[in-house]
Amino acid sequence: MDSDKKSGIGNPTLILMFAVAIFFDILQWLLVFIAMGWLAGIFAGLTFYVWFKMHGQSFMKPKRFLTFGGAFLIESIPIISSLPAWTGAIAILALDSKIKKVAPGLDIMKK
C-alpha cells in the first residue's frame, strides 16, 4: 500500500465515510420494517472495519473497540436501531484519527 494511505484519513475519505454511514443508518432504518435491519448492520460493520484498516487504523485500543462495538450493538437491537449509531461512531473514530494527524499530542479518546 501507499504510505500516504497508511498515514491517516484524508478529507475526501472522511466526507465519503460520513455519507456511507448516513446511507447505512437510513438503509437499516428502512429494513427494520421488514425485520432485515440486522443485515445492513453486518455490512456496515464489515465495510467500516475494512475501510479503517486500509487507512492504518487499529481497533485494539479499548475505547476504539468500544466505540465501534457499541455502534454495532445499538444497530443490532430492533427498537434502538433507529438511532444513527453508525454515523456517530464514524464521526468519533474518523475525527479522532484526524485530530491525531493534525495535533499528535491531543487525543479525544483519552479518559
Image: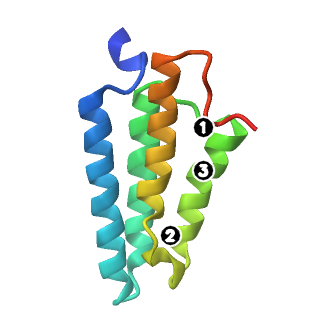
Front residue of 4 and 54:
4
Q: Residue furthest top?
A: 3
CA gap, disc 3 and disc 2: 12 Å
Residue 67 disc label: 3
Determine the residue positioned at 29% across, 71% down: 27
Contact? badges 3 and 2 (CB < 8 Å): no
Q: Does residue 39 lie above or below 58 as drawn?
A: below
Which one is closest to the eye, mark 1 or mark 3? 3
The residue carrying pointer 3 sits among few (fewer than 14), some (14 to 19) or many (20 or more) residues within 10 Å by Cα, namely many
Q: Quadrant of residue 104?
A: top right
Determine the residue positioned at 53% across, 79% down: 80
Indicate the position of residue 49 as horizontal and vertical percent values: 47, 43
Indicate the position of residue 42 as horizontal and vertical percent values: 45, 62
Q: Amino acid at mark 1?
A: Phe
Residue marked by disc 2: 75
CA gap, disc 1 and disc 2: 19 Å
Q: Amino acid at mark 2?
A: Glu
Indicate the position of residue 9 as horizontal and vertical percent values: 37, 27
Residue marked by disc 1: 59
Determine the residue positioned at 47% across, 18% down: 101
- Regarding mark 2 in the picture, which secondary structure is present there? helix
- Regarding mark 1 in the picture, which secondary structure is present there? loop
Determine the residue positioned at 53% across, 72% down: 76
Looking at the figure, which quarter contains the N terminus?
A: top left
In this rendering, position of residue 6 left or right of residue 103: left
Q: Amino acid at mark 3?
A: Thr
Indicate the position of residue 102 as horizontal and vertical percent values: 45, 17
